[in-house]
Amino acid sequence: MSILLHPSLVENIQHLSDVRIDNVPAIPALPLIEILKALLNVHAYRSALGELHVKRITWLQGFFVCIVLGSAGSCTVALIRGEPLGVIYKDEFWISYGIVYWLMFSNNFMHSLIHRLFSTFPVVHRLCIGLSGINRGYSLVKYGIDGVTKSAGIDTIIGRLLCGTIVGCGAGFWFELFSLGQPEWELITPKLFLSPSANVKISFWTSVAYLTFSSYLNNDDEAHAMGSLTFALLLVLNHYHISNKCRDAQPVKETKAD
């Protein structure tokens, strides 16, 4: 029985990944959330590269980076726990990223269109971040944190906290470690060891919050839903904070230019 959240909300969060886009010729039904995550990751990667470097990378190189961005967190935890890499068994993951990557990198129009959409209507960008964040948060708490107990049969707080945090921010670690945002990759010290990024902090504090309130809830489904919402809310608030900082800094730059 749900105590804090409405039962329908808990159920919708559980089945969010089941919402699919179908009736597209020659393409199987694909999860809407997987498409949204692919769109956000591929758009962020191309934006990080910059137009000068887009043509310097190969198609295979760019696609590999996008796959890392979409799956490195859960894959890292799977390797740590000695489990199979779940992404290998998800055809819809590869198809979704393949389609979005092709659309975003085969021409400038699609990237410009998405960039203009997100810039003109920030609420659309935040909605995409929130929906994908709910799905990511669900993986963080159910697979990352609770998966430790299920895998090892031991309720270790450090292990659950570590795996939950890695599921949430593991992609950023590998992205920084190998400088995947540059045309030529090189091994460097990840920035999170020098100054933890917002994504690391959000993943860590979501894990802490989930471990705290899940011990007081008898309903696992409600605990998973609350953890998912916590992660998504923090992501949206962080994006709102960054957007405001950039907007406030713009008049200063224009004043200096004058």
Image: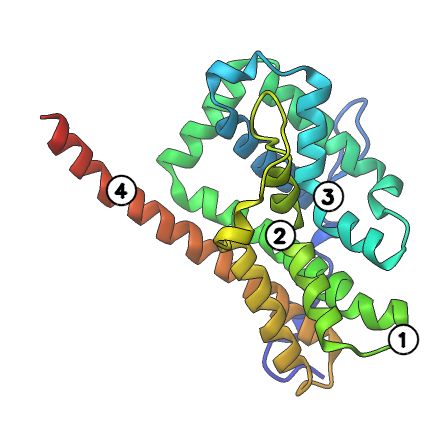
The residue carrying mark 2 is 169
In percent of width and height, residue 47 lies at: 49, 28
Indicate the position of residue 24 as horizontal and vertical percent values.
Answer: 74, 27
Which residue was labeled with disc 1?
153
Q: How much space separates mark 3 and mark 1, taking CA atoms?
A: 25 Å
Residue 54 vertical placement versus 131 (above, below): above
Q: Residue furthest left?
A: 258
Identity of the residue drawn at 58% across and 20% down: 183
Looking at the image, do the residues carrying marks 3 and 1 touch, with CB atoms under 8 Å apart?
no
Locate residue 78, reporting x and y percent. 83, 53
Label annotation for residue 36: none
How dense is the environment of label 2, judged by Cα within 10 Å: few (below 14), some, or many (20 and up)?
A: many
Q: Nearer the viewer, mark 2 or mark 4?
A: 2
Determine which residue is flagged by label 3. 71
**Residue at x 54%, y 31% (from the top left corner):** 43
SS for tag 1?
A: loop
- Label 3 element class: helix
Residue type at mark 4: give it: Arg
Residues at marks 4 and 3 touching, judged by CB atoms closer than 8 Å: no
Q: How far is mark 1 from mark 4, CA to CA? A: 49 Å
Q: Nearer the viewer, residue 193 or 109?
A: 193
* Residue under label 4: 247
Q: CA distance from mark 4 to mark 3?
A: 32 Å
**Pointer 3 or 2: first along the chain:** 3
Image quadrant where one finds the C terminus: top left
